[in-house]
Amino acid sequence: MKISNTASSLAICLTGALLLTGCSPIVSLEAAPLANDPNCAEISVRLPDSIDAFAKRSTNAQATAAWGDPAAVILRCGLEPVLVSTLPCVTAGDVDWLVDETQAPSYRFISFGRTPATEIIVDSNVVAGVTALETLAAAVQNIEPTKLCTG
């Protein structure tokens, strides 16, 4: 009878652990060079629990976040600010974003005129870039702009 109680206790503990950690594995990302900037912490604490229908997942690097399984949206704060660029610039959610389309249908957006810069990578096959940008802009707006897109 003692073995049965031990097995039952172990099963309950394992079930509880799975419920607490969820079924999705941690998203492995690389922290940006300036990830320890206090402005990244300000962004991190303001990130939404979901973007569209995609739930936020755990990541293994400072100042990063991911949504969806597999990850449909990835955020990394702490990039060197972009001073000059030939990339197109759009405004979404009152934040200026440089648009890198070289890996389409995955689009890379980099905040412009904010230090440090924030990078957002969106798989446009599953979520619209504008949806991700407008949702995440509420957190990124906490870094005051020093420059705006022109032209």
Image: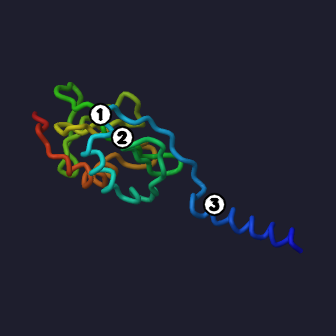
Residue type beneath disc 3? Leu
> Which image quarter holds the C terminus?
top left
Residue located 45% across and 44% down the image:
125
Pointers 1 and 2 in contact (C-beta within 8 Å): yes
Residue located 63% across and 60% down the image:
18
Q: CA distance from mark 2 to mark 3?
A: 27 Å
Q: Position of residue 64 (x, y in %)?
A: 39, 44
The residue tagged with tag 1: helix, strand or loop? Answer: strand
Residue located 32% across and 55% down the image:
45
Mark sitting earlier along the chain (3/1): 3
Tell me the residue that label 3 is attached to. Answer: 18
Q: Position of residue 61 (x, y in %)?
A: 44, 41
Residue type beneath disc 1? Leu
The residue tagged with tag 3: helix, strand or loop? Answer: helix
> Which image quarter holds the N terminus?
bottom right
Vertical placement of residue 61 versus 134, above or below: above
Q: Could you classify mark 1 by the number of other residues whose Cα lies within 10 Å: few (under 14), some (14-19), or many (20 or more)?
A: many
Vertical placement of residue 49 versus 69, above or below: below
Tell me the residue that label 1 is attached to. Answer: 79
